[in-house]
Image (cartoon, grey):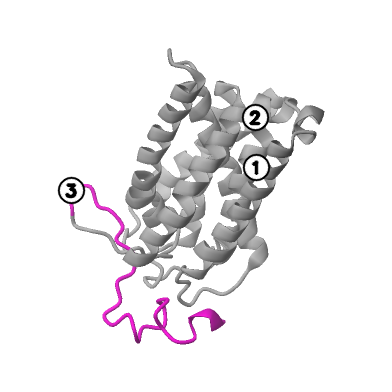
Amino acid sequence: MLEIFIGLVIAVGLLLAILYNTKYRNHPWDIYYPNLAWMRAGMYFCACYTLSYFTGGMELILNSPVFTQEQLDNPNWRLYVTGATLFIFVAYAGVWSYFTPVFERKKNVLISATFGFLWGSSSGQLFLSIWLLAGHLPLPAWGCALAAFAVLAAYQPNWHNIYWDHYIAPEHDTPMTQVIKATCCHIPNLSLTLTFLTIYENYLLFVSWQVIACVSAGIGMRYPAPWAKPTKLNYAVRTDAKIPRCTGYIPEDPKSDPYTPFYPGWQQRS
């Protein structure tokens, strides 16, 4: 059954890649097209699921116990799970979402949450796959965990700055909020969850935390439906460097700009 599922995932990924590269590749890059963003995201989702299958991560998620009775009887495990879950929820549904410009995007919780689920489940499996691959290094368990953290710490900001935040996610940051989200959300998230994975090896819980984070972020940024209209307002500004990087939305006057956290009434966005 798992082989059939991953076969369908690979087929969908290839179909999206062929369709995108033959029909949509030359669309203007300085306009945000939600339908193309969903196509690009779909290719990423399929790639992550496929990697998870071939590294054994998907099988571990499906066939390993969510937790054991021994873990349930362990107060340290219970405290860790409770604390990590609370942190992920507060960090992403609270801090991350609060410091997120949404411009004129309308709320559509179901669409945004659906995108967030696909995003979180695929990214979580990608993180798990990197951790599993690092486990093959001739290092003790903690050395392998640190290697996985180093790879992901290098990969994540570059992937987001160079590609994800420009071609898949609509503009949802300023230079200030990028720093806030990295230091208060992303780095602690990776540190907490990878440490937990290394100690307890609860694979589904590990991925579930990334799902919570990304569903919260998807709703917080009001990720648009694929049929939403293209617009320059949601296009991510980027540098003119040889490898362009997203800078975040830079207002002329942050104190009077309605799309930044400095503006009075920032929390009362429609």
Which of the two labelled residues, at mark 3 and mark 1, occupies the earlier sequence position? Answer: 1
Highlighted magenta segment, given as a residue range: 241-270
Residue type of the residue flagged with mark 2: Tyr
Query: Which mark is nearer the camera, 1 or 2?
Result: 1
Residue 257, image x, y percentages = 36, 83
Q: Residues within 10 Å of mark 2 (few under 14, many from 20)?
A: some
> Which residue, as the protein is rendered here, is positioned at the far front?
75
- Residue 186 appears in the figure: yes
Per the image, is 28 magenta? Answer: no
Residue under the image location 55 percent in, 83 percent down: 268
94 up-or-down from 63: above or below: below
Say left or right for 3 vs 227.
right
Q: Most prominent secondary structure in the magenta stretch?
A: loop
Quadrant of the rendered structure where residue 154 is? top left
Q: Which residue is found at the position 50% from the left and 62% from the top?
A: 96
What residue is shown with label 3?
242
CA separation, marks 1 and 2? Answer: 10 Å
Of 187 and 56, the residue lying toward us: 187
**Residue 125 location, x and y as percent?**
57, 35
